[in-house]
Image (tube, rainbow, N blue to C red):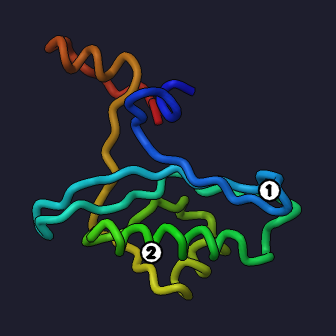
């Protein structure tokens, strides 16, 4: 909780409310593009309660984030989507988001980070 809501949060959070009740949230943070020479807005997580899905709340939250990106002079607004999430991918394409197949997401986590940082031999262990 401190990571999101402490004195120096690593990301920002927006909460969708209906009649005073939280029904969804978005977690986002800034990035920087050396190509554009501008910061960007990265959406890390978007969640809408199941009973509120399909009612426009996700679209409203994405639109709110897009306006925030414009206000903050961001050169891009981006997020990741699982390749097998066809309904989401179709929706994102309908609203004008482009898939970028020319890049890979590369990741180290857990013990792999520590091993690499310390110069120890790193073996692929199937970490995600």
Disc 1: which residue: 49
Whichever of labels 2 and 1 marks the residue nearer the N terminus, that label is 1
Name the residue at 75% across, 59% down. 17
Front one among 53 and 127: 53
Query: Around disc 2, counting alpha carbons within 10 Å, would you say few (fewer than 14), some (14 to 19), or many (20 or more)?
Result: some
Question: What kind of element bears circle 1?
Answer: loop
- Image: 121 above or below 128: above
Quarter where residue 91 is shown: bottom right
Disc 2: which residue: 67
Would residue 49 be found to the left or right of residue 31 on screen? right
Would residue 81 be found to the left or right of residue 22 on screen? left
Name the residue at 58% across, 54% down. 14
Mark 2 to mark 1 CA distance (whole Å): 23 Å
Name the residue at 19% across, 18% down. 117
- Image: 62 above or below 44: below
Quarter where residue 88 is shown: bottom right
Quarter where residue 35 is shown: bottom left
- Pinpoint residue 57: horizontal percent, then vertical percent: 71, 71
- Tally the marks: 2
Query: Around disc 1, counting alpha carbons within 10 Å, would you say few (fewer than 14), some (14 to 19), or many (20 or more)?
Result: few
């Amino acid at each position: 909780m401190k990571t999101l809501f402490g004195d120096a949060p690593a990301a920002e959070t927006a909460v969708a409310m209906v009649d005073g009740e939280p029904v969804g949230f978005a977690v986002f943070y800034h990035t920087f593009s050396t190509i554009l020479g501008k910061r960007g807005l990265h959406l890390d997580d978007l969640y809408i309660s199941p009973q509120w899905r399909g009612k426009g709340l996700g679209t409203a939250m994405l639109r709110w984030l897009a306006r925030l990106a414009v206000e903050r002079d961001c050169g891009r607004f981006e997020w990741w989507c699982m390749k097998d999430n066809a309904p989401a991918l179709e929706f994102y394409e309908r609203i004008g988001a482009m898939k970028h197949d020319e890049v890979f997401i590369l990741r180290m986590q857990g013990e792999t980070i520590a091993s690499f940082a310390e110069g120890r031999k790193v073996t692929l262990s199937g970490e995600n």
